[in-house]
Image: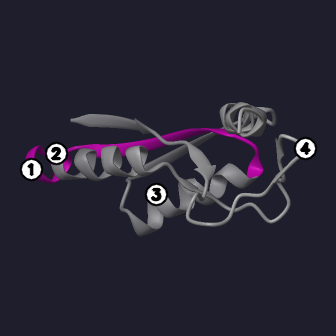
């Protein structure tokens, strides 16, 4: 069985996220794999252990999104990794958080 798991790099909410003038301060912000995506990857790996096959992880984002691929590949055990480079992904990730910050 071949399984593709989409992973998204998100700001690490365990750290203090700074807001200035209703905008998230990106300086010093670190990113991690979404906990939902990490759970999906673990489930996919369990399925392939039970029935055979491979898990491919895929992410879309700037060069730094490769950090999440490395973690998913080396630390979590995915068999293959695909990175679709898209420089504006960071704006898509932060937009919902920025909207929330403006409403606080």
Q: Which residue is drawn at 39% across and 44% down?
A: 36
Q: Give the range drawn in magenta.
A: 47-63
Q: Quadrant of the N terminus?
A: top left
Residue at the far right: name it.
21
Instruction: Give the mark, 1 or 3, whose residue is nearer the N terminus.
Output: 1
The residue pinned by badge 3 equals: 72
Q: How far apart are marks 2 and 4 (CA)?
A: 46 Å
Q: How far apart are marks 3 and 2 (CA)?
A: 16 Å
**In front: 101, or 3?**
101
Q: Residue at x 31, y 36 (%)?
A: 3
**In front: 58, or 7?**
7
**In front: 39, or 2?**
39
Left or right of 41 on screen, residue 28: right
Specify the quadrant of the image occupied by residue 61: top right
- Circle 1 SS class: helix
Where 99 falls versus 16 (above or below)?
A: above
Q: Distance between the residues labelled 4 and 1?
A: 51 Å
The residue pinned by badge 4 equals: 21
The residue pinned by badge 2 equals: 47
Q: Which of marks 1 and 3 is in front?
A: 3
The residue pinned by badge 1 equals: 50
- Circle 4 SS class: loop
Left or right of 94 on screen, residue 9: left
């Amino acid at each position: 069985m071949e399984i593709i798991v989409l992973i998204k790099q998100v700001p690490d909410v365990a750290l203090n996220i700074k807001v200035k003038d209703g905008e998230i301060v990106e300086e010093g912000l670190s990113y991690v794999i979404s906990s939902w995506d990490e759970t999906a990857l673990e489930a996919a790996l369990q399925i392939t252990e039970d029935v055979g096959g491979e898990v491919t992880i895929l992410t879309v984002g700037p060069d730094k999104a490769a950090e999440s691929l490395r973690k998913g590949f080396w630390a979590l055990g995915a068999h293959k990794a695909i990175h679709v480079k898209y420089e504006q992904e960071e704006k898509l990730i932060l937009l919902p958080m920025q909207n929330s910050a403006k409403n606080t």
